[in-house]
Each structure stands twice: as C-alpha cells, then as structure tokens.
Amino acid sequence: MSDKLSIVILAAGKGSRMKSDKAKVLHLISGKPMLFHIIKASKKISDDISVVVAHQKERVIQEMQRYFDDINFIEQDAVNYPGTGGAVMNISAKHEKILVLNGDMPLITPEALEGFISCDSDIIMSIFNLENPDGYGRVIISDVGVEYIVEQKDASEDELKVTHVNAGIYSFKKSVLERYLPKLSNNNAQKEYYLTDIVALAKADGLSIEPLLVDEERFKGVNSKADLASAEVIMQDKIKEAWMAKGVTMQLPSTIYIQESVNFEGECIIENGVRITGDSHIINSHIKAHSVIEDSVVINSDVGPMGHLRPLSDISDTHIGNFVEVKKSTLKGVKAGHLSYIGDASIDKGSNIGAGTITCNYDGKNKHKTTIGKNVFIGSDTQIVAPCVIEDDVIIAAGTTVSADAVEKGSLAISRTKMVKKENFFYKFFGKK
C-alpha cells in the first residue's frame, strides 16, 4: 500500500445508457456492484479513498457501507458544479498525489494502477493505443510528454493519424489541483467543468504531463448492458484463472460461473455448467455438471449433476445426487441420491434419503424444522411433515407420510392405505376392445 497516494472515485453519474432505474455503479459484476470492485482494488494501494456521489447517493453509500467502513463519501454539487472537474472540487486529500478514477471501470487492478504511483510528474495522464481510434480525441505526445488533446472533429490530417487516445484516468499533484480547479470554466456546450481542461492550463504554464500507456481491457468503461456483459466475461475469466492457478480443476471453464466472494480449499473439481454464488465455501469437493450452489458450505462431498444447494446449506462427507434440492439444512455423512427436497433440516451420519423424499417445512405462515438422527433409512416417496424429530436407527417405509412430532429410536414408521384391486375395471371404464 502506498503512503503517497490518495484516490478519488467519480461515482456521481446516472448512467442513462444502462436503461435502468439503478445507478450505474451499482450494477452487478460477478455478484458485487461495479463500484465495489474499484474500491477493493484501490484499497490495496491507498489508505485514503474518497467516492464522489450524487445520483441515488443514499443508495450508493448504503450499499458500499455493507463492504467498507473507512471510505469518505463526498456529495457533488451537480447543480452549480457539474462535470468531472466539479466532482473533485470539494475533495480534501490526505496525500500529495491524487489519482482520479471513474466509477464505471470495474476491471481495474492494483497492478494496473502501479504506474500512477511510480511516476513523479505534475500530471500523469492515461492513454490507450488503438488500432482504430475513430471517434476518439487524440493525445498528441512529444519527447517531453503530453502536448495537448485534440477532438477528432478539430484534428488535422496528421493529427488524425495519431493512435493515442485519452483513457480518462489522471493523477495530479495536490498543488496542481489547488492551483487550477478555481480556474476551470464551464463555458462549453454542456456547461460542465472538465478535468481535461486542467491539462491545457498546466501545459500552458510549463508543468510536466506524463502519458501512461494502460491496458485497454483493465480500464474498460461500462456504459451499457452490452458493456456490462462484456466486463462480466473478463471478470469471470480473471476469477477462474486465479482459482485454477491455486489448484482448482475446472472442466470447460467458459461454461462455469463463480462469484467474487466464493472460496475454495484443497482438491476441488468443478464440472461444466456449474454456478456458485454468494459466500459459498467449497473444500475438497466435487461439484458435478449443471449444479447450483448458493451461499453454502460443501466439505468432502459431491453435488450433482444438477443438484441445487440453496442459501445456508452446510454439507460435509455427503453425497447430493441429481435433482436434489437442499435449503438451509445441515447434512453430515448423508446420502441423498436423487429427486428430493430437504429444507430447514438437520440430518446426521449414516442416514439415507430415498428418491422423492420431501421435508414439508412450510405451513403457509412459518417454516418448521426437521431433525433426522444417525443411521436413518428413509424410503422413497416419503413426506416428513415438520416439525418432526426422527431419532437414530429408524426406518421410514416407502410411501409414508410422517405426521407425528417424533419417531422413536429403533422404530419402523409406515403409513400406507390398503391396496384395493377391482377386476376388469379397465374394460368397464374404457370399454371392452
């Protein structure tokens, strides 16, 4: 972490091109708001971070305070001082160098920002080098640094051949901002104050302006739902590559979705089509194809194919088979092979859950708990009406509805009506052929 750098993140805009009622910086990428990712990266290189807010400011602040408790939030006076220049006018920075980031660049990494720390120029201006810069203003560079920025419509034929364009990120010495922010004018078509104008003012006074070539992918701005989807792909690749580097096996990783908050330990195998979200923690386990795990813990177990662990499930030494759904339940040393729903339950070692078993946990008003002990064998097509306690060493016969509050240790529980057979009923009902 640098003790020389303050960071200002501009997060005040509406993001109208997102076509959404939600503030742009709150749109999710890999399970967390865009702004979260930028703050997380920033905190690794600075101990002084300010976020400028305006549109839906209360909502933005509340959401970020779920994750961070040491961020300064500054409200922009968007009426009197709109624009990027206006956004930094009320900033009180701790350090002598100030890095200004945009709140819609969620792919920024600490490593991508290192160049702003090491350089000591008055202004450091990020640039892209584009094969096709059409539509962008050009950054004209000489041996001594940035000379000026020219908009495409105003560029000469030689200037149009330049492939360097403005990436929109700057660092300033504090004295530069203190000197030039009061001199900014909003005498333009948008009636806004622009940070880019500081570059021209500083150049006119002979200050040093260093261009910093940055990775276009890491500094990608998200301005539309298409941009959001593109950034999600890049973020997902980054997350999965990091976990594979730590030993997680992933089959067809492009088909797997893993949120930013998920953790793995030990030997884990993740098959194709898997989705793992929330604060899920996977330890020495095998998640089979097309399974979904939400906010759950899986230890020394296998899930799927097509298994579903809903939030607050905690399973260990357990087999969860295909089309088994588990919700807010703890399973230790259990086999649940297929086609079952286990909700609000606790099941202990050695128990077997037959196909079609359902814990009937909801009475229309409240959820109720099912407790199943050790070495319980539950036959297929069983319904357990909660609340219910099934003690150790119990057999529940197939087709049983367990409606008692408890089934005692060593018991067999069975509730079947007597089968009735009516001879030749088929022919009477459908007519004899």
Image (cartoon, grey):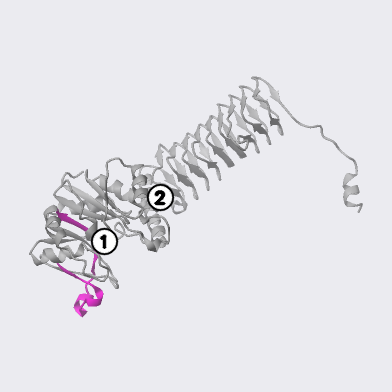
**Which quadrant of the structure image shows residue 3?**
top left
Residue furthest front in the image: 80
Q: What residue type is labelled 1?
A: Pro
Residue furthest bottom in the image: 157
Mark 1 neighbour density, 10 Å: few (under 14) some (14–19) many (20 or more): some
Disc 2 secondary structure class? loop
Q: The C terminus is located in which quarter?
A: bottom right
Mark 1 / mark 2, whichever is N-terminal: 2
User: What residue sits right under mark 2 in the picture?
Assistant: 30
Q: Where is residue 93 in the image (x, y as percent from the top left)?
A: 18, 48
| Residue 152 at least partly seen | yes
Residue furthest left in the image: 206
Is 72 left, or right, of 426 in this rendering? left
**Residue stretch rendered in magenta on the structure:** 146-173
Q: How many labels does the image show?
A: 2
Q: Where is residue 305 in the image (x, y as percent from the top left)?
A: 55, 44
Q: What residue type is labelled 2?
A: Ser
State the CA–CA distance, disc 1 to disc 2: 31 Å
Of 109 and 39, nearer the camera is 39
